[in-house]
Structures are given as C-alpha cells and as structure tokens.
Image: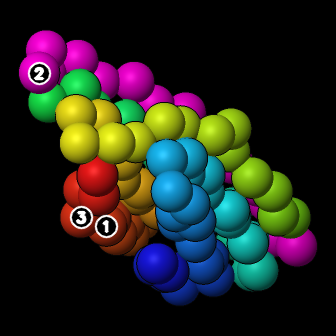
Amino acid sequence: MSISVPGCIGHLNLSSNWAYGHLDSYTTTCWLTIFQRNDQTGGQTSQTISYGPGGRGDTGQFYHDSIHAVAMAISNGSQSNSTAWYH
C-alpha cells in the first residue's frame, strides 16, 4: 500500500501479522506516522519518522490481527494523506 504527497512517498508494508512503514523523502522534509489501534479497548499507539530531502527509512514493526488494526499517514507540512485501517 503506497500513499504520497508532493515530494514524499510512503509505503505501508503488511505481512501476516506485522506491519511497518517506509518513507522516501525526495524534495522536501516529510513525516510518516504508523498507527496501531486496539478495537477492543480503543487504545492507540503510533510512531512518527521524519526525513529531509533525499532521506529514507523505516518505522518499527507493529502487530496487527483481528483485534489490532494498523494505518499510516504522510505529510510534507502543508499536505497530508492517509490509508484506511487494516487488520
């Protein structure tokens, strides 16, 4: 799953039970946040990474299953985009 804003591309990588985000910053500073939500408790956790032009990197891994959902958002400071939630 890929999402983008001008100057930035993010990839949400989903395996059987683990997910992580990858950020490529091309021409500007970009922020990528991966979220994990517990549907039973409503609790949520997240991690944000940021890179300047030419930078790239990964978030940590987040667990997902029938109870835990993950999603991702990307921003260049003026525009943002996000994915749906995935179990």
Relative to 55, is 31 on the left or the right?
Answer: left
Magenta span contains residue 43: yes
Circle 1: is it few (<14), some (14-19), or many (20+) Cα within 10 Å? some
The residue under the point 35% across, 53% down is 71
Please name the residue that numbered disc 2 is placed on.
40
Relative to 36, is 43 on the left or the right?
Answer: left
Q: Which residues are magenta?
A: 40-54
Q: Callout 2, which amino acid?
A: Gln
Relative to 52, is 4 on the left or the right?
Answer: left
Q: Position of residue 13 (x, y in %)?
A: 58, 65
Circle 3: is it few (<14), some (14-19), or many (20+) Cα within 10 Å? few
Front disc: 2 or 1: 2
Position above or below: 82 against 33: below
Please name the residue that numbered disc 3 is placed on.
84
Asked if residue 53 shows in the view, the reply is yes
Position above or below: 2 against 68: below
Count of number-bearing discs: 3
Please name the residue that numbered disc 1 is placed on.
83
Relative to 46, is 53 on the left or the right?
Answer: right
Q: Position of residue 55 (x, y in %)?
A: 86, 64
Q: Callout 3, which amino acid?
A: Ala
